Structures are given as structure tokens and as C-alpha cells.
Image (cartoon, grey):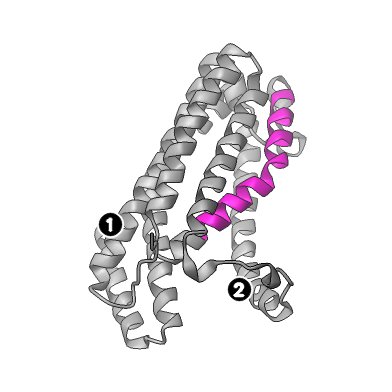
Amino acid sequence: MQRVTSMTEGNPAKLILSFAFLLILTNVGQQLYMIVDASVVGRGIGVKALAARPLLVLLQTPEDIIGGATVYLLTMISGTLIVMAYNMAAAVLRTFGDGRSPLHAMLIAAFLNAGLDLLFVMVFRWGIFGAAIASVSAQLVSFLYCLTQIKKIAYVQIPKNTWIPDRKMLKELLAFGLPIAFQYIVIAISGIVLQSTINTQGSSFIAGCTATNKLYGLLESTAISLGLAFSTFFSQNYGAGKKARMKKGVQTGVKIVVAAAA
């Protein structure tokens, strides 16, 4: 089954909005399953466990949650490669205009994460470690699902002779990726500064902020999804050399963003 959607032909607004809609469902679903995760942790372990996220001594983490924070941090770090692999696989699918597969992967991960949360936290009583390992396991399954869908795309079949690193390609990828990475580092640092202030208010205040951030994520979903849809539209048309269509896409994008913001 062909899983490529071309954005180089057709109405730009229709293409962008239809693709963004699938991404919005995916992002909203991810936020909802994170809320479910927080709910299970809060009810199964307690509000102090909900406050235990990767916030350690440098961030003035209260002593009553630092143990749980350490456990959660180490578990999530161990699954970093899995999260990276999922994000990469989902990005490849989105690049080809496939918004359905990441949505399906999210739904699988959501139900699996909720089920494993209940099993590990409420039944096995593994506490914060159980909540973290449930999230990592769900991400692994979603990555494997995305990988099976990528294999169905003829354009990205990977024969063994292509596994040899291409230095020129690596250089181009780094030149494009490092500025984006720096952008996220700056955002993360600003978040750390803010979190260090929040941590001085005690574990109950931290738990409240954690729960609020879960809900705020729902508000961000539309903006993030539109951004991804625009990126797919522009990248495909840039690759096709359709500069006039890219300009039209910018004009369309501005109108959509203004309407969404309003």
C-alpha cells in the first residue's frame, strides 16, 4: 500500500489543513495519554510522586521527592534512544505526507501506556519506576509500528549496501540539524531556570505545575501540528523546485495561523 501524499499538486490550504488535522489528533492524543499517566501516578503513588520529574539538586528539588525524581530520570535516560528512534520514524512518515501512521502509533502507545501504568503502578506496585518503564515500553512499540509502515514506502527501502556512512550527507544533516538542536537547547535552559524557581515552592506546588503543564500541552497541539504540516508542504515543494507554489503556501499559511490564533 502506497503511503506517500504529494503536496506538490492541489489546493495548498486543503492539503495543509487535512494533514494538520491528523497531526492535531496525534498530538492531542499524546497529551491525553500523558494526562492519564499523571493521573495513575498521582492516585497510585501520591502527589509527591507526581511532583518527581527530572528536577534534581541543581534545580533545588525538595528532599521529599528527589529520590523519586532520580529513579524517573535514570529510567527515562535509559530509553532516550527509543524516544529518538520513534521521533525519527514519525518524522520520516510525516515527510512523505503520511499522518495516519503516526496517529495509529500514538493510539497504540496510548492504550499500551495506560494499561502498563495500571499494571506496573497499581498491581505490581513498582512506583515511579513502573510509570517510567511503562512510558518507555509504549514508545518502543510505537517506534516498531512506525518502522513497519516505513518499510512499505518504496522510496525509503534500505538495501545492505547503503548502510555505509555518507560523509557528505552527514555533513548536510548536521548543518541542518544543529541549529534546530540549539534552538531546543535554549528553550530547555529557559525551562530549567523557570523550574528552579518553581522548585523552591515545595512538592505540592511542583505537582500542581506538572498537572497544569499537561493541560497546557493540549493548547499547544494545534500550533505544533500546523508547524509540522507547513514544514512538510514547504520541504516537498522545495525539493520539487516549485518556488511559486512555496510562496503561495506562505501566504496560505499566514492566513491559517492568524485564524487559528484568533
Q: Amino acid at mark 2?
A: Phe
Q: Is residue 14 left or right of residue 177?
A: left
Q: Bin the neighbour count of mark 1 within 10 Å (Cα to Cα): few under 14, some 14-19, many 20 and up.
A: few
* Tag 2–tag 1 contact (CB < 8 Å): no
Q: Which part of the image, by quadrant, shows the N terminus?
A: bottom left
Residue at image location 67% in from the left, 72% down from the top: 162
Q: Nearer the viewer, residue 261 or 251?
A: 251
Q: CA distance from mark 2 to mark 1?
A: 28 Å
Q: Quadrant of the C terminus?
A: bottom left
Q: Indicate whether 126 appears above or below 58.
A: above
Q: Residue at x 27, y 64 (%)?
A: 256
Q: Nearer the viewer, residue 83 or 216?
A: 83
Mark found first going from the N terminus, 2 or 1: 2
Residue holding disc 1: 260
Front-most of residues 88 and 184: 88
Identify the residue position indicated by label 2 in the image: 176
Magenta highlight range: 67-91
Would you place residue 260 above or below residue 11 in this image?
above
Q: Is residue 76 magenta?
A: yes
Residue at 70% x, 72% y: name it: 161
Relative image position of residue 163 (x, y in whole percent):
70, 68
Residue 88, percent across and down? Answer: 57, 57
What secondary structure is the stretch in magenta mostly built from?
A: helix
